[in-house]
Amino acid sequence: MTSRRGFAFPILAGLAAGVLTLTAPARVDAADACEPLNKAVDRMMAGPTHAYSRNSLSGHESESETIFVDGKTYVRVHGTWKVSPLSPAELAKQRKENLSHSTVSCRVVGEETVGGSAATVYESHAKTEAGDSDEKLWIAKSSGLLLREEETLRDTANDVTRRSARYEYSGVKPPI
């Protein structure tokens, strides 16, 4: 199913790089295959969430962490924690606005276990003005939480960024 909506593309890599390129649901339709992804990303951003990301761009590897807790967004890059100027609520608002011009397709591709939790595995493809994205997302069956994500982003200059992330939801505290 292809629709005009989205879920989360480089949310964490974007925060770490200071660039915010998020997708957004234009409207929610109960029959929409992307709805579980949109809900999982909304819940992830609402926190408390601790995300661990590995990024690769043109052979350069990096790691980052993002924490959404107590109405603040914390980003760790190169070993240093900083408070983002954008709160999770502001990011969510920007997410709803940024890429409402995208075309996204989503589909269920299987079931797996992630960290002891049964998960539904989704694949998605998005086309935006900035490029396109292919993602694989693992969403917990019991809670609807986003557990893991792998993504490949291609911008209009054909630069490719690969990102993988895992998400934790318990014991999350502000790092600074």
Image (cartoon, rainbow, N blue to C red):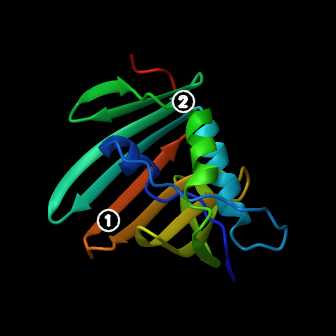
Return the disc, 1 or 2, that comes first in the chain's sequence. 2
In the displayed structure, would residue 144 be above or below residue 119? above
Residue type at mark 1: give it.
Arg
The quadrant of the picture occupied by the C terminus is: top left
Q: Where is residue 143 in the image (x, y as percent from the top left)?
A: 72, 49
Numbered tag placed on residue 162 in the rendering: 1
Q: Tell me where residue 140 sits by quadrant.
A: bottom right
Circle 1 — which element? strand
Q: How many marks?
A: 2
Q: Answer left or right for 135 relative to 61.
A: right
Question: The residue under label 2 is which amino acid type?
Answer: Ser
- Residue 171, image quadrant: top right
27 up-or-down from 92: above or below: below
Say whether residue 19 is left or right of residue 37: left
Mark 2, other Cα within 10 Å: few <14 / some 14–19 / many ≥20: some
Give the SS element for disc 2. Answer: loop
Decide: few, some or many residues near mark 1? Use Cα within 10 Å; few <14, some 14-19, many ≥20. many
Q: Where is residue 60 in the image (x, y as percent from the top left)?
A: 15, 58
Q: Name the residue under label 2.
A: 87
Indicate left or right for 8 with 157 as reference: right
- At a point 85% along the width and 67% down the height, the residue shown is 30
**Outermost residue toward the bottom?**
1
70 vs 65: above or below: above
What is the x, y in percent for residue 2?
66, 81
Q: Is residue 97 above or below residue 2?
A: above
Report how far apart the C-alphas of labels 1 and 2 lie in the structure. Answer: 25 Å
